[in-house]
């Protein structure tokens, strides 16, 4: 067993969508893994935008209809998948509504708000991300609704008036689009995609032990006290 004189600090870019159930599972699993490797290994998370359904209209679409069109899945198959996802979430502390999400929505405004939150504080961005996932998957709320977004921003410690100002404009739209293109141009076409120190990619909502092993391996190969610039 090796010891280090100071903790290893990792930068983690978590590319995801707030309407992606495996992103909720992956984030919860990663956080459990980070708890297991602390305090020897610490990390700063940055949440990067990815839209699973960028063409989704404002009113959204019935979830069964959407998944049936996308994958050809039946109601029975969707129910089985929903229960499996619910159990995977429960194992890492994330609660999915047993009934599932009634509709699929456009998430671009949520990503704009997350972009602003990162500029304010990575910790507040992380809090907002988790609140938006909970709003959608646990509470079956609409993540494109301005009131839902402002309420989540406020709960995350962000300024409600500023959040509303952003949502009522197109502020951070260009920056968000550019960030989305950067990751798709880099070859990321499914999420979650977890990028550690700008070079190590872990794809999917992996089990805790997979994340824990990867964090230890990457931290062991990195200098102690790694900067997160």
Image (cartoon, rainbow, N blue to C red):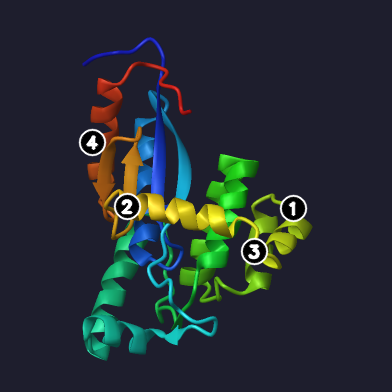
Query: Does residue 229 appear to the left or right of 29 in the view shown?
Result: right
Of badges 2 and 4, nearer the viewer stands 2
Whether the residues at callouts 2 and 1 have beta carbons within 8 Å, the answer is no
Q: Position of residue 117 (x, y in %)?
A: 61, 49
Q: Position of residue 94 (x, y in %)?
A: 42, 60
Q: CA distance from mark 3 to mark 2?
A: 23 Å
* Whole-number angstrom distance, CA of label 1 to CA of label 3: 18 Å
Residue found at x 30% / y 13%: 3
| Of the image marks 3 and 2, the number of the one nearer the N terminus | 3
Q: Quadrant of residue 37?
A: top left
Residue at 46% x, 63% y: name it: 18
Circle 4 crowding by C-alpha within 10 Å: few under 14, some 14–19, many from 20 = few
- The earlier-in-sequence mark between 2 and 4 is 2
Pinpoint residue 190: horizontal percent, then vertical percent: 29, 60
For label 1, the residue is 159
Please give the residue where the numbered disc 3 appears in the rendered image.
Answer: 170
Foreground mark, 2 or 1? 2
Disc 3 on helix, strand or loop? loop
Is tag 1's residue or tag 4's residue first in the polypeptide sequence? 1
Q: x, y percentage for residue 153? A: 65, 57
Q: Nearer the viewer, mark 3 or mark 4?
A: 3
Read off the residue under disc 4. Answer: 213
Q: Earlier in the sequence, mark 2 or mark 1?
A: 1
**SS category of the residue bearing label 2:** helix
User: How many residues crowd around disc 1 within 10 Å: few (fewer than 14), some, or many (20 or more)?
Assistant: some
Residue 54 higher or lower than 179, as above or below = below
Give the quarter of the figure containing the N terminus.
top left
Disc 1 is placed on an element classified as: loop
Question: Which residue position holds label 2?
Answer: 185
Separation of marks 1 and 4 at Cα, in angstroms: 38 Å
Q: Residues within 10 Å of mark 3 (few under 14, many from 20)?
A: few
Q: Residue at x 46, y 51 (%)?
A: 179
């Amino acid at each position: 067993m090796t010891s280090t004189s100071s903790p290893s600090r990792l930068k983690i870019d978590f590319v995801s969508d707030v309407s992606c159930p495996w992103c909720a599972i992956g984030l919860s699993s990663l956080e459990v893994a980070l708890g297991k490797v602390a305090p020897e290994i610490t990390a700063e998370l940055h949440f990067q935008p990815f839209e699973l359904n960028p063409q989704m209209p404002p009113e959204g679409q019935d979830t069964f209809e959407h998944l049936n069109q996308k994958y050809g899945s039946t109601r029975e198959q969707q129910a089985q998948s929903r229960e499996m996802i619910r159990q995977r979430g429960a194992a890492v502390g994330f609660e999915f509504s047993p009934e599932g999400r009634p509709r699929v929505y456009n998430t671009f405004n949520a990503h704009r708000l997350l972009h602003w939150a990162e500029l304010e504080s990575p910790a507040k961005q992380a809090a907002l991300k988790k609140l938006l996932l909970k709003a959608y998957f646990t509470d079956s709320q609409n993540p494109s609704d301005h009131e839902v977004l402002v309420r989540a921003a406020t709960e995350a410690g962000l300024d409600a008036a500023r959040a509303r100002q952003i949502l009522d404009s197109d502020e951070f739209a260009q920056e968000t689009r550019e960030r989305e293109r950067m990751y798709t141009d880099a070859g990321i076409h499914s999420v979650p995609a977890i990028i550690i120190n700008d070079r190590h990619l872990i794809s999917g909502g992996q089990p805790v032990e997979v994340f824990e092993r990867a964090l230890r391996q990457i931290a062991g190969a990195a200098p102690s006290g790694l900067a997160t610039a």
